[in-house]
Amino acid sequence: MTIVTTGPPPLNPGDLAEITLGHASALPVWLLFVGRALRTLWSNRKARIGLVILGVVILTALFAPVLAPHSPTATDFKPYQSPNSNNWFGTTGNGQDVFSQMLYGARVSLFVGLASGLLATLVAVTIGLVTGYRPGIVDEVLSFVTNLALVIPGLPLMIILAAYLSSRSVWTIVLVVAFTSWATGARVIRSQASTLRDREFITSAVFSGERLFRVVFREILPNMTSLVAASFFGAATAAVMAEASLEFLGLGNPNTVSWGTILYFAQQQNALLTGQWVLVFAPGLAIALLAVSFTLINFGVDALSNPRLREK
Amino acid sequence: MTYLTRKVVLFVITLWAAITLNFALPRLMPGSPVDAALAKLASSGQSVTNAERHAIQVQLGVPNTGLLSQYASYLKNIATLNFGTSYSFPSESVAQTIGKALPWTLVLVGTSTILAFVIGTLLGVYAGWRRGRSADSVVTLGSTLFAAFPPFWLGLLMLYVLAFNWNLFPLKGGYNPGVTPNFSLAFFGDAAWHSVLPGLTLVITALSGWVFGMRNNMINTLGEDYVTFAEANGLRPRTVALLYAARNALLPNVTAFGLSLGAIIGGSVLVEGVYSYPGVGNLLYVAVTNHDFPLMQALFLVITLSMLVAIFVVDLLYVRLDPRIRQ
């Protein structure tokens, strides 16, 4: 019941600035926008569950050094231990504490998910806006590239790319994942941009002499907040899964502590056959939870720009 | 241009682009995959013949020659299925290795895709029909959760519980060790038995796309006038749901086939690896862990081409399903 009084969602960051300046607020505009977005998301039940899970993962990643009972890399313990009072999730074949590794592992998964999601969304928004707003040869070529990227199987392409790139760092994975998961978002944004192109407010913006850059980023883009957010969380979900898959294959950096590398070493040391199922179960569940949180938040994202979808 | 000609032209162009991408990738990469491949071949104790060296260079990049002539010999090699020698399987050509593995994957991924489509669509119809009720929440939240499981992880867990702890299914492989693949009924039964767990893993993780697509289409279709009219005529609810709404909601779901296929093919790589299934995915797993670039590159081409062909076939089927695009 909170919807109607707040009025229509901000269509233009400029408008928002005027409204909020009236309240003599000292906060920057984008922060207010994020705050308002979070509040809308919070009012959606599914998105709220997602935000809570994501919040827990973020806190774990931030405070891993405080929370972890042991060093994640030190080989201080007897190898291949089952869960006990000292090592809650047991120890690896090298005698490392798995519980501490799990806490530190949140950092890599979260970073790769958010960074690749952000990069992929940047590419998707740029290509989607350019192709959607400017029909012609550029649109034809980029649309073909987008459709090609859509039909090329993503994970095999990632595997090939990661295998050719011999440098093993987290950034390699971020770039590879971003390079392979922008296409879905680009196509959705393109179709939305091409429908907005013929609207009256765009025509009047063009006639009033606004430059192309301003029309695209100040007039069209704010009307697609939910699509952009949706492609971000979609790409982030894909990135978390892809990172785990690549690291499980041994294509990540084996010296970093992440959920994917815990799985990799568990498989290398046949953890399941020796009864150490926690080594496999825990990191996989953590990856699944992070992916679920992004998907759940995505359910609430639709409500961001469409008040009719908001749950009462 | 008719729908059919447009699809054929698009298919041919996409095919060419995929083949060219496969040519460009190793040449754009920093470092030299050729040197890496040759070093690996030499370190495995084999003598590298000039023919082999040439085959690898044609595939991954020849130093000091024009790109155009490299591209020409690359195309010639593909046309003649000459993918060189892999060092993971030195006794046979890459084409033979892949040829043996391809039928396994086609059957496994094909069956899983069809099963996931049927089950997912039915669940989507049900969730859409019961939208807002608890059945809808259970189906949508359940498939969200299953879609978030990394396929290889779900495979590992099922392997551990169902095969290792309870001995219900075989632990690994595509058929009993010691048996040579043949066309007997006993062998097919054995192979099917070995495929249950990998297939189940793929079906479970691929369900959600179909469920969500079908659920949303159902909700849209249920708002149409002819559905209201059918209800007003006193037709049974099940008849309205299945014959009036679901029939028409199905069409857009078929077009989403390509994207879902990509997900299931990606999943199959690691799932086959986990189960040591004798298919293409497991070969890619082996090739990656051995840094076997010639095999890897040929496999990527085969996987991409299979996917393009599958999407093309679905496009052709679509003509039969939707009479509007036949004109």
Image (cartoon, helix red, strand yellow):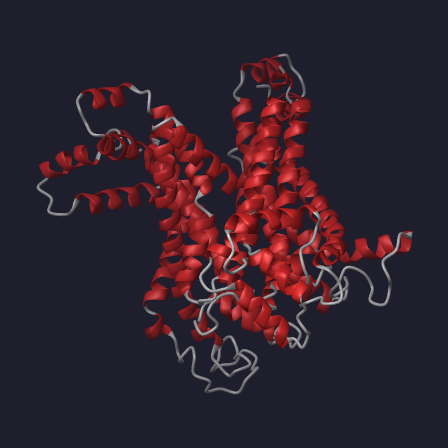
Viewer-proximal residue among A304 and B294: B294
Rendered location of residue A287, percent (x, y): 49, 59
Quadrant for the C terminus of chain B, please.
Answer: top right
Relative to A229, say whether A59 is above or below: below
In the image, is A145 to the left or to the right of B85? left
Quadrant (top left/top right/bottom left/bottom right) for the N terminus of chain B: top right
Q: Position of residue A177 (x, y in %)?
A: 45, 54
Check the image and report above or below for B76 versus B257: below
Task: State the residue in front, A22 or A1.
Answer: A22
| Whether residue B325 is situated above or below residue A138 in the rendered picture | above
The residue at 62%/74% (across/down) is B42
Give percent across and percent down for residue A61.
Answer: 36, 65
B28 or A15, which is in the foreground? B28
Tag count in the figure?
A: 0
Check the image and report above or below for B265 versus A3. Answer: below
Quarter assignment of residue A33: top left
Q: Nearer the viewer, residue A84 or A187?
A: A187
Q: Position of residue A162 (x, y in %)?
A: 50, 60
Which residue occupies 58% across, 18% down?
B227
Quadrant assignment, res A104: bottom left
Q: Is residue B268 visible?
A: yes
- Residue at 84 percent of width and 57 percent of height: B190
Query: Is residue A267 in sight in this rendering?
Result: no
Q: Quadrant of residue B167?
A: bottom right
